[in-house]
Image: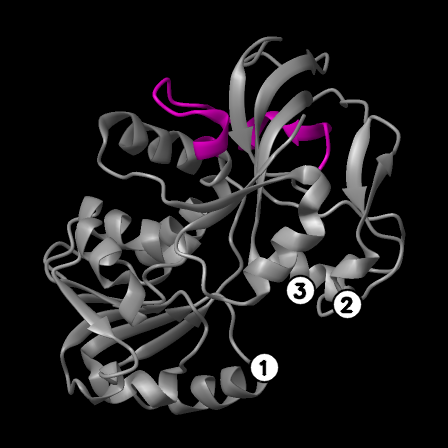
Amino acid sequence: MQAAYFNEYGPAEVLQYGELPTPTPKANQILVRVRASSVNPVDWKMRKGELKFITGYKFPKIPGRDVAGEVVAVGDNVTRFAPGNRVYGMPSDGVGGANAQFVVLEETTVAFIPEKLSFEEAAAVPLAALTALQALRDKAQLLSGDRVLINGASGGVGSLAIQIAKALGAGEVTGVCGPDNQELVRSLGADRVLNHEEHDFTKDLSRYDIIFDAAGKSSFVASKAALRRNGRYVTTTPDPTSLVVDTAAAVFSTKTTHAFVTKNSGSDMALVSTWLQAGTIRVVIDKTFPLQQLAEAHRYNEKGSAAGKIVLTVE
């Protein structure tokens, strides 16, 4: 199969495109012909070696966490899927593997692509949607009527978090973004939109029940005053130093801080699919690249200015 891969950690220039062995599904896995994938910050952080304590030194490595495609083969124990099914999900190895023509996925982590979505739209969903859902529902334990702030509201995770917060019953939802993306965030359902260049949300004293920092640009200590009593701060990308300080600061407080790693979940994917099919949430795609231009797509994502997701088409 053709795949994008790298044989050493480093800048985008280490990415190559060429022939690698096609994986074989095990008993509880399906083999998917990838039609589209995406770029997430975790992909280029892995490529740069920032996560080598997790990803190790076995090469080559194929990046990519989001898969949308068609089932071409199934393992002996698979019962839910058959060749020809349109599916989407994430690999479960913690490294990646989606930026290739074929990938194996665990049956329990996969969902059917909603009929109304293209492969490109579907590829923008798995990691971002699961992150937003699990952050708000599981870690922040969002309650009906809660006041929620999403920092980084125009990004891949943030653009879905705005909508998922509403779907979970949030009251007032505030989105924080740059000046160029305010109308986009408002169109996604945000009740308030703050331009981060003009408004420091941490000065909004005792306003929010939940602050979800989807951009990883703040901290619990910085945001604490903006939380109401029993408020919850959630982030997926904490700075290690900030994490220690934040944890200590929450010890004697009624306010809590939570950092987490997104879990692969087929049932959560099915819930997201229901929302997508009903039009409750929608996908925002900033730009599309062919897989052969993965290095360029990584550079674009590293700038941090994309509105929505960066999608890769796979021939």
Relative to residue 205, is residue 268 depicted above or below? above
Q: Quadrant of residue 85?
A: top right
Q: Does the magenta-highlighted stretch encompass residue 178?
A: no
Q: Residue at x 81, y 23 (%)?
A: 24
- The magenta stretch is 97-122
| Tag in front: 3 or 1 | 3
Residue 96 at least partly seen: no
Please report contact status of discs 1 and 2: CB closer than 8 Å, yes or no.
no
Distance from disc 1 to disc 2, alpha carbons, whole Å, reads 14 Å
Q: Quadrant of residue 167?
A: top left
Amino acid under label 2?
Answer: Phe
Return the x and y of residue 232 as percentages of the image width and height: 29, 72
Q: Residues within 10 Å of mark 2 (few under 14, many from 20)?
A: few
Of 250 and 22, which appears nearest the observer? Answer: 22
Q: Residue at x 38, y 22 (%)?
A: 114
Task: Name the residue beneath numbered marker 2.
Answer: 53
Relative to residue 286, is residue 260 depicted above or below? below
Q: Residue at x 57, y 59 (%)?
A: 300
Q: Which mark is residue 240?
A: 1
Amino acid under label 1?
Answer: Pro
| Tag in front: 3 or 2 | 3
Query: Relative to residue 3, is residue 191 drawn left or right?
Result: left
Query: Relative to residue 63, is residue 268 drawn left or right?
Result: left
Q: Residues within 10 Å of mark 1 (few under 14, many from 20)?
A: few
Query: Relative to residue 172, is residue 167 drawn left or right?
Result: right
Task: Name the residue beneath numbered marker 3.
Answer: 45
